Image (tube, rainbow, N blue to C red):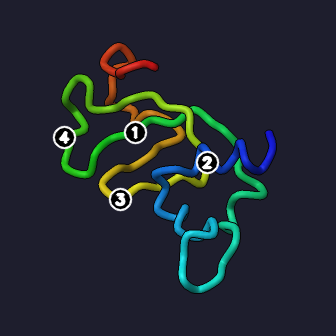
Amino acid sequence: MTESEKLQHCIGCRDDFYNDKNPIGVKRCWGLKTAKMVTRFRIGTWTKPDQPGAFTEVRKFNCFHRDGEHYFEELPSFVNPEDVIRR
């Protein structure tokens, strides 16, 4: 994946600010070079984790973070896999 292709996957990440979108002159986010696309499970900050549909399966960089959302590499043990929203 080229750097410009990688940058497309950074949109929405709170650290995308460091991809030449800042007044301090930082040209690239420190995580971009080693970023790997992985399957993660997303949940909103105020979402009750035990309700069906609380987690959504997504493909994101392992370094991706967004305010108001949390990403897990694995589902918590109490989550039924059939309750996950799949991509």
Q: Nearer the viewer, mark 4 or mark 2?
A: 2
Gap between marks 4 and 1, in whole Å? 12 Å
For the point 19% across and 29% down, which residue is it?
A: 51
For the point 26% across and 51% down, which residue is it?
A: 45
Q: Are marks 4 and 1 in contact (CB under 8 Å)?
A: no
Gap between marks 1 and 2, in whole Å? 12 Å
Q: Earlier in the sequence, mark 1 or mark 2?
A: 1
Residue 34 on image: x %, y %:
77, 55
Residue 25 image-quadrant placement:
bottom right
Q: Secondary structure at mark 3?
A: loop
The residue to which callout 2 is attached is 62
Q: Extreme bottom residue here?
A: 24
The residue to which callout 4 is attached is 48
**Hey, what amino acid is under mark 4?**
Lys
Residue 68 on image: x %, y %:
30, 55
Q: Are marks 4 and 3 in contact (CB under 8 Å)?
A: no
Residue 53 image-quadrant placement:
top left
**Hey, what amino acid is under mark 3?**
Asp
The residue to which callout 1 is attached is 42
The residue to which callout 3 is attached is 67
Q: How many marks?
A: 4
Q: Is residue 73 above or below residue 20?
A: above
